[in-house]
Amino acid sequence: MREAENIREVEQLSIVIATPHSQRENCPLSINWMGFIFWPKSSRYVSERPAYLPTKCKRVGVFVDEDIETVKRIAEDYDLDFIQLHGHESADYCAQLQDLKLIKAISVSGQDDIATYKTYEGLVDYFLFDTKCFSVGGSGQQFDWSVLSAYDGDTPFLLSGGIGPDDAERVKAFHHPKCVGIDLNSRFEQAPGLKDINKLKDFLNALNNEQD
Protein backbone atom coordinates (compact mmCIF):
# COMPACT_ATOMS: atom_id res chain seq x y z
CA MET A 1 0.00 0.00 0.00
CA ARG A 2 1.14 3.55 -0.65
CA GLU A 3 -1.81 5.65 -1.91
CA ALA A 4 -3.51 7.51 0.95
CA GLU A 5 -7.09 7.19 -0.31
CA ASN A 6 -6.60 3.53 -1.21
CA ILE A 7 -5.26 2.89 2.29
CA ARG A 8 -8.37 4.54 3.78
CA GLU A 9 -10.68 2.47 1.56
CA VAL A 10 -9.02 -0.83 2.42
CA GLU A 11 -9.01 0.03 6.10
CA GLN A 12 -12.72 0.89 5.97
CA LEU A 13 -13.35 -2.40 4.18
CA SER A 14 -11.55 -4.23 6.96
CA ILE A 15 -13.91 -2.66 9.51
CA VAL A 16 -16.99 -3.75 7.54
CA ILE A 17 -15.73 -7.28 6.96
CA ALA A 18 -14.71 -7.60 10.60
CA THR A 19 -18.33 -7.33 11.74
CA PRO A 20 -19.92 -10.62 10.64
CA HIS A 21 -23.36 -11.92 11.58
CA SER A 22 -21.94 -13.61 14.66
CA GLN A 23 -21.14 -10.13 16.05
CA ARG A 24 -17.57 -11.11 16.84
CA GLU A 25 -15.39 -8.11 17.47
CA ASN A 26 -12.65 -9.44 15.18
CA CYS A 27 -13.28 -11.82 12.32
CA PRO A 28 -10.16 -13.93 11.62
CA LEU A 29 -10.88 -13.63 7.89
CA SER A 30 -10.59 -9.85 7.71
CA ILE A 31 -7.89 -7.37 6.74
CA ASN A 32 -5.73 -7.03 9.82
CA TRP A 33 -2.34 -5.92 8.45
CA MET A 34 -1.18 -3.65 5.61
CA GLY A 35 2.18 -3.92 3.90
CA PHE A 36 4.51 -1.07 2.90
CA ILE A 37 7.44 -2.01 0.68
CA PHE A 38 10.72 -0.24 1.37
CA TRP A 39 12.80 -1.98 -1.30
CA PRO A 40 13.77 0.61 -3.94
CA LYS A 41 13.74 -1.93 -6.79
CA SER A 42 10.09 -2.82 -6.23
CA SER A 43 7.34 -1.36 -8.42
CA ARG A 44 5.44 -0.92 -5.14
CA TYR A 45 8.25 0.99 -3.42
CA VAL A 46 7.11 3.59 -0.89
CA SER A 47 9.35 6.44 -1.96
CA GLU A 48 7.66 9.03 0.24
CA ARG A 49 5.44 8.90 3.28
CA PRO A 50 1.74 8.54 2.36
CA ALA A 51 -0.53 11.35 3.53
CA TYR A 52 -2.46 8.76 5.53
CA LEU A 53 -1.29 5.61 7.33
CA PRO A 54 -3.60 3.00 8.86
CA THR A 55 -4.61 3.31 12.49
CA LYS A 56 -6.78 0.19 12.81
CA CYS A 57 -4.67 -2.22 10.75
CA LYS A 58 -1.17 -3.24 11.78
CA ARG A 59 1.61 -1.70 9.68
CA VAL A 60 4.10 -4.09 8.10
CA GLY A 61 7.31 -2.79 6.56
CA VAL A 62 8.83 -5.04 3.88
CA PHE A 63 12.61 -4.96 3.44
CA VAL A 64 15.09 -6.84 1.25
CA ASP A 65 18.65 -7.22 2.59
CA GLU A 66 18.51 -3.68 3.92
CA ASP A 67 21.04 -2.07 6.25
CA ILE A 68 19.95 -2.77 9.82
CA GLU A 69 20.14 0.84 10.94
CA THR A 70 17.97 1.86 7.97
CA VAL A 71 15.37 -0.74 8.96
CA LYS A 72 15.31 0.58 12.51
CA ARG A 73 15.01 4.19 11.35
CA ILE A 74 12.12 3.50 9.00
CA ALA A 75 10.41 1.31 11.61
CA GLU A 76 10.47 4.27 13.99
CA ASP A 77 9.52 6.88 11.37
CA TYR A 78 6.50 4.88 10.19
CA ASP A 79 5.64 3.40 13.60
CA LEU A 80 5.73 -0.08 12.09
CA ASP A 81 4.21 -3.00 13.99
CA PHE A 82 6.10 -5.69 12.05
CA ILE A 83 9.21 -5.97 9.90
CA GLN A 84 8.99 -8.44 7.01
CA LEU A 85 12.37 -9.64 5.77
CA HIS A 86 12.07 -10.81 2.18
CA GLY A 87 15.69 -11.24 1.16
CA HIS A 88 18.62 -13.43 2.19
CA GLU A 89 18.88 -12.08 5.72
CA SER A 90 20.89 -14.33 8.04
CA ALA A 91 20.01 -15.60 11.49
CA ASP A 92 22.57 -13.14 12.91
CA TYR A 93 20.83 -10.30 11.05
CA CYS A 94 17.51 -11.28 12.67
CA ALA A 95 19.18 -11.53 16.07
CA GLN A 96 20.19 -7.86 15.76
CA LEU A 97 16.53 -6.84 15.33
CA GLN A 98 15.11 -8.57 18.37
CA ASP A 99 13.61 -5.32 19.62
CA LEU A 100 11.20 -5.48 16.66
CA LYS A 101 8.56 -8.03 15.67
CA LEU A 102 9.81 -9.98 12.66
CA ILE A 103 8.29 -11.89 9.76
CA LYS A 104 10.76 -13.93 7.70
CA ALA A 105 9.76 -14.83 4.16
CA ILE A 106 10.73 -18.31 3.00
CA SER A 107 10.82 -18.88 -0.78
CA VAL A 108 9.31 -22.22 -1.77
CA SER A 109 9.46 -24.25 -4.98
CA GLY A 110 9.32 -27.69 -3.36
CA GLN A 111 9.21 -29.53 -0.06
CA ASP A 112 12.97 -29.32 0.50
CA ASP A 113 12.72 -25.52 0.80
CA ILE A 114 10.48 -25.74 3.86
CA ALA A 115 13.41 -26.82 6.06
CA THR A 116 14.94 -23.36 5.62
CA TYR A 117 12.75 -22.22 8.51
CA LYS A 118 14.98 -24.07 11.00
CA THR A 119 17.66 -21.40 10.56
CA TYR A 120 15.30 -18.76 11.96
CA GLU A 121 13.22 -20.69 14.48
CA GLY A 122 13.11 -18.76 17.77
CA LEU A 123 14.37 -15.55 16.13
CA VAL A 124 11.21 -14.40 14.33
CA ASP A 125 7.54 -14.04 15.24
CA TYR A 126 6.11 -15.34 11.97
CA PHE A 127 7.17 -17.03 8.77
CA LEU A 128 5.69 -16.20 5.37
CA PHE A 129 5.86 -18.99 2.82
CA ASP A 130 5.98 -17.48 -0.67
CA THR A 131 6.60 -18.73 -4.20
CA LYS A 132 10.26 -18.91 -5.20
CA CYS A 133 10.76 -16.71 -8.27
CA PHE A 134 13.37 -14.62 -10.05
CA SER A 135 12.00 -11.43 -8.51
CA VAL A 136 11.44 -10.82 -4.80
CA GLY A 137 7.78 -11.66 -4.22
CA GLY A 138 4.75 -10.12 -5.89
CA SER A 139 5.06 -12.44 -8.89
CA GLY A 140 1.44 -13.62 -8.82
CA GLN A 141 2.72 -17.21 -9.09
CA GLN A 142 1.57 -20.03 -6.81
CA PHE A 143 3.35 -23.02 -5.34
CA ASP A 144 1.97 -26.39 -4.25
CA TRP A 145 0.62 -25.72 -0.76
CA SER A 146 0.61 -29.44 0.05
CA VAL A 147 4.38 -29.26 0.61
CA LEU A 148 3.67 -27.23 3.76
CA SER A 149 2.75 -30.50 5.46
CA ALA A 150 6.52 -30.75 5.95
CA TYR A 151 6.47 -27.68 8.21
CA ASP A 152 6.67 -28.91 11.80
CA GLY A 153 7.99 -25.77 13.50
CA ASP A 154 6.52 -23.89 16.45
CA THR A 155 6.39 -20.46 14.78
CA PRO A 156 3.04 -19.49 13.19
CA PHE A 157 3.07 -18.66 9.49
CA LEU A 158 1.29 -16.71 6.77
CA LEU A 159 0.39 -18.30 3.46
CA SER A 160 1.45 -16.32 0.39
CA GLY A 161 2.20 -16.84 -3.28
CA GLY A 162 -0.19 -15.62 -5.94
CA ILE A 163 -3.46 -15.97 -4.03
CA GLY A 164 -6.12 -14.46 -6.28
CA PRO A 165 -9.83 -13.59 -6.43
CA ASP A 166 -10.77 -17.10 -7.59
CA ASP A 167 -8.94 -18.90 -4.79
CA ALA A 168 -11.45 -18.59 -1.94
CA GLU A 169 -12.42 -22.27 -2.03
CA ARG A 170 -8.78 -23.32 -2.26
CA VAL A 171 -7.93 -21.19 0.77
CA LYS A 172 -10.85 -22.60 2.75
CA ALA A 173 -9.72 -26.12 1.91
CA PHE A 174 -6.17 -25.50 3.17
CA HIS A 175 -5.52 -26.52 6.76
CA HIS A 176 -2.37 -26.38 8.87
CA PRO A 177 -2.31 -25.84 12.65
CA LYS A 178 0.30 -23.09 12.38
CA CYS A 179 -1.28 -21.12 9.52
CA VAL A 180 -2.72 -17.90 10.96
CA GLY A 181 -3.34 -15.79 7.86
CA ILE A 182 -2.99 -15.25 4.13
CA ASP A 183 -1.18 -12.62 2.09
CA LEU A 184 -3.11 -10.86 -0.70
CA ASN A 185 -1.15 -8.72 -3.10
CA SER A 186 -0.55 -8.57 -6.84
CA ARG A 187 -3.68 -10.36 -8.04
CA PHE A 188 -5.86 -7.88 -6.14
CA GLU A 189 -4.26 -4.81 -7.71
CA GLN A 190 -5.43 -2.36 -10.34
CA ALA A 191 -1.80 -1.24 -10.62
CA PRO A 192 1.31 -1.86 -8.49
CA GLY A 193 0.56 -0.62 -4.98
CA LEU A 194 -3.11 0.13 -5.75
CA LYS A 195 -5.64 -2.41 -4.43
CA ASP A 196 -8.94 -3.22 -6.16
CA ILE A 197 -11.52 -2.69 -3.41
CA ASN A 198 -14.26 -4.71 -5.10
CA LYS A 199 -12.02 -7.73 -5.64
CA LEU A 200 -10.94 -7.65 -2.01
CA LYS A 201 -14.49 -7.28 -0.75
CA ASP A 202 -15.85 -10.12 -2.89
CA PHE A 203 -13.00 -12.41 -1.90
CA LEU A 204 -13.33 -11.76 1.82
CA ASN A 205 -17.09 -12.20 1.66
CA ALA A 206 -16.54 -15.55 -0.08
CA LEU A 207 -14.23 -16.65 2.71
CA ASN A 208 -16.59 -15.51 5.44
CA ASN A 209 -19.66 -17.18 3.92
CA GLU A 210 -18.41 -20.45 5.35
CA GLN A 211 -18.76 -18.95 8.83
CA ASP A 212 -22.36 -17.65 8.57
Image: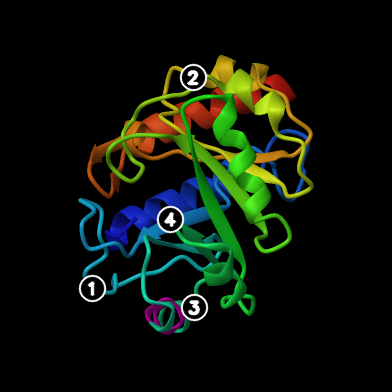
Q: Please report contact status of discs 2 and 1: CB closer than 8 Å, yes or no.
A: no
**Residue that badge 1 annotates:** 48
Upstream in sequence: badge 4 or badge 2: 4
Q: Please report contact status of discs 1 and 4: CB closer than 8 Å, yes or no.
A: no
**Residue that badge 2 annotates:** 167
Residue 159 x, y percent position in the rendering: 57, 36
Q: Disc 1 and disc 3: Cα gap in Å?
A: 15 Å
Circle 1: is it few (<14), some (14-19), or many (20+) Cα within 10 Å? few
**What type is the residue that disc 2 sits on?**
Asp
Residue 96 x, y percent position in the rendering: 57, 78
Question: Which secondary structure class fits the magenta region best?
Answer: helix
Circle 4: is it few (<14), some (14-19), or many (20+) Cα within 10 Å? some
Upstream in sequence: badge 4 or badge 3: 3
**Residue that badge 4 annotates:** 88
Q: Is residue 34 above or below residue 30?
A: below
Q: Is residue 40 above or below residue 133?
A: below
**What type is the residue that disc 3 sits on?**
Asp
Classify residue 181 as left or right of residue 139: right
Q: Disc 2 and disc 3: Cα gap in Å?
A: 32 Å
Q: Is residue 1 above or below residue 59?
A: above
Residue in front for this viewpoint, 87 or 90? 90
Closer to the observer: label 4 or label 2? 4
- For image coordinates 68% across by 48% down, the residue present is 118
Circle 3: is it few (<14), some (14-19), or many (20+) Cα within 10 Å? some
**What type is the residue that disc 4 sits on?**
His
Upstream in sequence: badge 2 or badge 3: 3
**Residue that badge 3 annotates:** 79
Disc 4 is placed on an element classified as loop
Specify start and end residues of the magenta stretch as a single range: 70-74
Disc 1 is placed on an element classified as loop
